[in-house]
Amino acid sequence: MSKTPKKRNPLHLEQRNGLWFAVLNIPKECRPKLGNKVKFIKSLETHNQREAVNNSYKFIAQWKSEIAFAKGSFTKPLLERASELKKRFEDKTEDELLRDPEWNNYLKTSTLFIPSKEITEFHAEVAGALTRLAPHRDGWVASLKQKAKTKDQMIRDVDRFLGVCKMLEDITAKTIKKWTDELIGLGATQSSINRILISCKSFYKYLKVAGELAHNAENPFTGLAEVVRETVKKSKKSRSNWTVEEALKLYEEVKATKHPAMLSLFIIGAYTGCRINEIAEMKKEDVNLKEKFFYLPKSKTKDGVREVPIHNAILPLFKRLYAETKDEYIIASTAENQYGNRSAPLSQRFGRIKSSLGYGEGLVFHSFRGTVATLLENAGVDETVAAHIVGHKIKTMTYGLYSSGTRMSIKLKAINKISYPAPFNQFA
């Protein structure tokens, strides 16, 4: 008499004391990057096999993506498809989903080689738990009735916000406060932040019209002017400049992170006094290697639009960045899409690095503007020439109102009077 074959558990499921668990073995080579675990395991908190199968999908998909990411494989996430999938699946029952070939295809494609945070957001949006903001951007733009110049500025402001806040559920008072604090740390003025908040307030109001929010929902961008004023006031009192010794210490720490874009941005900032967003948004077409300068066509002030001399010490760095760039920008950024603020990921990384060394809120990337100004002053550079280099307003009538600016040859001579000790002066 033949033996009855042992009943096998469904793929990636185990039953223990009657309870079902989702289980996925981790390849040996991936274990060091995943906490040295041998396998992923998660209780599905059910004795029903069919329910366990349904509940296991999201865990298995996420674990597979983490394994693939640990292997070093990476492809662009499917966040752009999440809204479409959400509409397609939201009215289906579990039985209908199991029989739907599109749903099964989603389960396969959702095992993308992307970080767990992103795959979690993807699943959450498809499930209706999260609402992505980017799809509403164009509708809001179309609703604007302002004059062209004002409209363009509002779009830039909201695009900046969408670069740091991607989900509707992320818009909270705490998130906005953290973001405005970061803007202040980057040197934004009270008036510019208030303008940005007005633009974001308009976008949030549009989300109500789009049906994503209740009409009586409180607008979190309202009433922040006083908070911003006090924060700016406090920041100005506490802000100081990096010393040469601190810059050298920072350089060693940034270099140790092995992040080329962050290192390049840091070096350029320390040798030019440029704002972080000015460097991050610098385009290849605006760099003149032959005459040793780069042009900044956009800045937060009129005086910030300028030609900046390239110090001899960092010219080799500029030549390498110019030759190696894979797009139109000199500095690479992980900003995810056309709405991304290119400086945001780099600003956040710099903040973590300087905080790890014990530097507080008074010392930020913007502090290098003061550092370069101080170095120029101590090198005996004329104040007007220094102002034209860092992009400060000339307050005198003759130079400020009537002069066409300082010649590049004079600015090059001036910038090469500043110096840092080795090894913060060798960038071949």
Image (cartoon, rainbow, N blue to C red):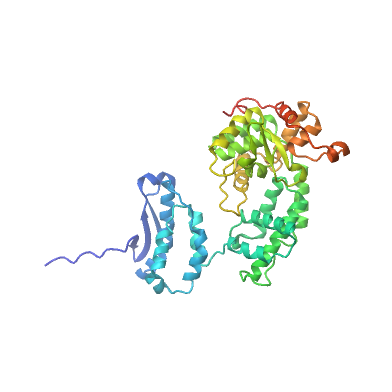
Q: Is residue 330 above or below residue 66?
A: above
Examine the image and state in which quarter residue 167 appears: bottom right
Name, please, the residue furthest toward the left. 1
Find residue 321 and report its horizontal and vertical position in percent.
57, 36
Quadrant that contains the N terminus: bottom left
Percent x, y of residue 14: 33, 61
Please state which of residues 195 and 144 is positioned toward the viewer in this rendering.
Answer: 144
Residue nearer the viewer, 258 or 43: 258
Say which residue appears at 62% left-offset and 48% top-offset.
Answer: 344
125, above or below 374, in the image:
below
Residue 94 in the image: state x and y as whole percent. 42, 72
* Residue 77 makes an appearance in the image: yes
Residue beneath the point at 63% across and 46% down:
343
Is residue 44 visible from the viewing direction of this image?
no
Which residue is situated farthest in the right direction here? 397
Q: Is residue 147 left or right of residue 76?
A: right
Tell which of 275 and 26 is nearer to you.
275
Where residue 290 sits, quadrant-wise, is: top right
In the displayed structure, 69 sits above or below 120; it is above
Please count the marks in the image. Answer: 0
Locate residue 138, reporting x and y percent.
62, 62
Query: Which one is in front, 334 or 245?
Result: 334
Residue at horizontal 68 percent and vertical 72 percent from the top: 216
